[in-house]
Each structure stands twice: as C-alpha cells, then as structure tokens.
Amino acid sequence: MADNKSQIENSIVRIRKRNGSVSDFNRDKILNAIHKAFSASNKPDKELASQLTDKVIVKLVEHGFSVENAPSVEDIQDLAESTLIDNGHSDIARAYILYRHERRKIRDQKLKILNAKILDPVAKAFDINCLRVLAARYLIRDNKNEIIETPSELFERVALLVAIADMLRDSELFANEGKISQDVEDATAYLQKLDDFNYKFKLGTFYLNKWHFRCLINSYVELAKQGKMKVSFKELLTMLASKKLDSYSDKVSEYYELMVSQDFLPNTPTMMNAGGRLGQLSACFVLAMPDDMAGIMKTTSDAALIFKSGGGVGINYSDLREEGEIVASTSGVASGPVSFMNIINTVTDVIKQGGKRRGANMGIMEVWHPDIEKFITNKTKPGILENFNVSVGVWKDFWDVLVNTGDGKYTLHCPRDNSPARELSPHHLIDLIAQSAWKSAEPGLIFFDNINKYNVFAKARGGPLRATNPCGEQSLYPYESCNLGSINLANLVKRTADGQYEFDWQRYEETIR
C-alpha cells in the first residue's frame, strides 16, 4: 500500500506555474491550502487535510498528469475543489474557493503595484504594504518613471554591493599592516570607461553592474592609498574573471536572505542607492552652521544635496548670533538662528529625500543661547518647522545652577564673542521645555555633558561633540555620517514545544554578525 502511494506521488514531480515556468512539485503546498480552508471553517484537522491531499494527487494521476505531462497550478486547485466536494466537505470547498479568490485578488494587486506581468519569489512572499513601500521608494525606475526592477533584483543589487567590501578584505587581497604600494592611477583610469564593464564581471552567479564596478574601484583605491592592497587592480580583475573569488557569492546570498526574510533591513539610502548611480549609503549627516552668510548658504546647499540622495541632517544652530544683534558688515541686525532654520525647513519641503520621501532634520540650540526661549516654544504653533526634530543641548553648568543654587540665575551668552547677554531662571527654562514638550512633543533634551564624558575624539577633533543625527541616537562631528539598520526582533521570537515563547538569542547574534 505504501509502495503504491509512493509510486503515485512520484508520478507528479513538476508543476507548471502561472508565468509558464516549471518548478518542483511540493505536496505540502496542497496540504497547507486545504488545511487553511478547514481552519477558516473553524474545523482544523491536519490529519484529514493530509488524507484529502493524497486523494488530490491520485486524481491528478487519474486525469493523465505524469512526469512528462506536468499539471498547472490551476489544474491542481480545480482538483482540490472537486476532491473536497466528492468527499462530503462542500463547506470546506466553499472556504477553499474563497481562499483562491482572495489569493487571486492579492496577486492581481501585487502585479499592479509592481507594474509587472509575473511575480518573482520575493513579491510572492512580501505582503501588499511591503511591496507598496518598495515600489514607492526603492525599486529602480526608468526616465518615464516606470519600474524596471523586481524586488528580487533590488535585494540582489544591495547584497552584492555589501559583499564587495567583504571580498576586498580577503586574505589574498588585504594586508592589514598597510605597507604595500600600488598604482592607484591604474585603478582610477577605469572610472572613465564604466559602461565597458557593465555586467562584465561576476561573483558566482551575481553580475556586477557598472555602479557595483565603480564601488569596487573606489573601495580598492581607498584601501590601496592606505597601503593595504596586496595586488594591483588588474590582478584583482583577473582573479574575478578566473572565479578565484566566487566563494563570496555565499556572502551575497547570506545578505540577500537576511533582507528577504525581513530579519534585517539597511537604511533607506542603502536600499535606494546601493548598486545605483548615486551610491550614497548613509542615512544621517551632521553639518556645521557658521555665523557668516557664505557658510550658511554652503550648509544649505550641502543639506539639499544630502536630501536629494536620501539622507537626513543634524545641525547645531548655536553659533549663529542672536536675533537683533548688529551685523558689522551691513550695520543691520541679525535674523537669528530660528529664521535660518526656516530656510532649511523650506529646502527640505522642496527637495524630498532621494526624490521619494520628506527629508528629516535635527535642529539643536544650546541652552546658553540668547534666543533659547524662542527656540523652545517655536514648534508649539501649528505648521512651524514641520520637517524638524528640535532639541535643547544642555551642559553641566546649567544643571549646577538649577540644582545647587536655589533661586540662582543662569547666564546666557552671545555666540559671537561669548559675552554675557542676560540672566534668567533655569527653573523657568525647564518649565518652558516641559510645557512645550507637553503641547507639541518638542523640544527634546540632549545631554552634551554626558555625551562628551565618553567622547575619546575630543582632543583629536579640537572640541566636544555638539550635534546628533536627525533622530538623536548618534552624536557626530560636522561632516560625519552614520549608517542605520533595523533588526526585526519579532522575527526572532520562537515558539517552543510546550507552547511557550522565547527569544532566539543565537539567531540574534548571527543577524548582528
């Protein structure tokens, strides 16, 4: 009996998919669909579903399907329906039909979102909301704004770029001592002929497009300048062509699966730009805001370029002189930091991040600035600085006055020459911050005294850290950037045999590494 069952199952080894391709037959897919229909009817019965699955397979053979004549997906589903009805489960058949209808609707929606004729494996696995985000932000489009990349190609594009960095640190290529001289001009010459190398080289089955190739050149040059490349660039290309580095295709697959499983996703600029023309992978930047018009306009221009490439900006505005301060060059008066924040806010409105979403800013003013009260209360009014998070930067001297002097006064200073401007109650400022935060969730507080307690770069950089990225989790010096990524902790919760839930610490470690 068992041999007969095995013989019948072995008669169906392939199926024809909706896109015309042929793939391996998987009994579990029929079983799962039937079991879901039972569950939808509040009659879950895995054993009965398994028995009915076997009957579907018998029907497939009876209808003439075989190794040579593979059934289509629709053939299998039609016979599953008739099997349910023939065995007295018309209510389950109804649920199965509804299930098919709902799946068809979802499939059609996905095709419309992706402007596609067939769905790739990632599109099938991801839900509609995920695909909407991919289509709106990440999938590459042509000059007619038509999507020309599948979700699978997107994640391959990103994974391949990340693997290039690993490859360049192979022991055959990389010398950590930094004492080897290479001709970087030979490598940079390839930048003038990128089109000639579009999809010419590959890691395993993954082809490098010209932007991957550009990244390879630039990364090689950077390491070669540090004396860390054991081979010339031409030797590196020879190794690529001869498949000596193909083992790194495993890294591509590893990164790909990490993203497709939704265990981890890199920040938006990486998804948008990895393996693309811009090549800008960082999400967050900090810029300086000097107290002169040329410097202010340069920072504004730099911010615009960062927004265009998909990044966000953090700026400390405390170096700008206070509103009403005399400007010697014109004998006029200064507009004050908040006015210049409005300029950045307008630029952010006009230039979406990467042309696909609103930009993000962190605006910081230190607690000693004469305009601090205006800064604190500015966002309590609707429609003000809507593209900004704002935070008050606080130092130890403020806390000392607040905590230790009772009704003591805190001195505000002019940023131009550090001269005393006026005094006010630190309790008044704290109350103002609390009231404004209650009204509008702004401002936050940044504890610069605590941040700089652990800052080992202060001496090398000539001063303390005074700014953060737009969300405030990473302190940075001007013109530094940071890359963000998200681990899906919900995916790392597993159910044990006794029905309890526990966190998968091993998989968590593997994801991080």
Image: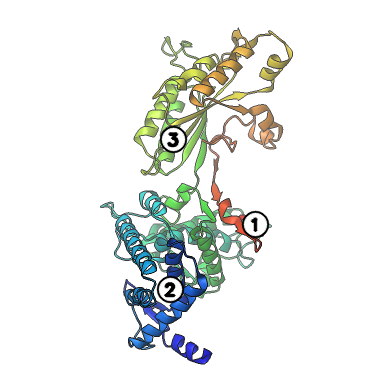
- Labels 1 and 3: the sequence-earlier one: 3
Residue picked out by circle 2? 30
Q: Is residue 398 left or right of residue 260?
A: right
Image quadrant where residue 335 sits: top left
Residue type at mark 3 is Ala
Closer to the camera in the image, 326 or 76: 76
Quarter of the rendering occupied by the C terminus: bottom right
Dot in front, 1 or 3: 1
CB atoms of marks 2 and 1 within 8 Å: no
Q: Check disc 3 and report the residue beneath it.
A: 303
Q: CA distance from mark 3 to mark 2?
A: 54 Å
Compared with 255, 376 (above or below) is: above
- Nearest the viewer among 127 and 86 is 86
Residue 500, label in figure: 1
In the rendered image of this protein, does residue 389 appear above or below residue 235? above
Q: Compare marks 3 and 2 and give the one earlier in the sequence.
A: 2
Which amino acid lies under the numbered mark 2 shown in the image of this protein? Ile
Residue 142 falls in image quadrant: bottom left
- Kind of residue indicated by mark 1: Gln
Distance (Cα) linking label 2 and label 1: 29 Å
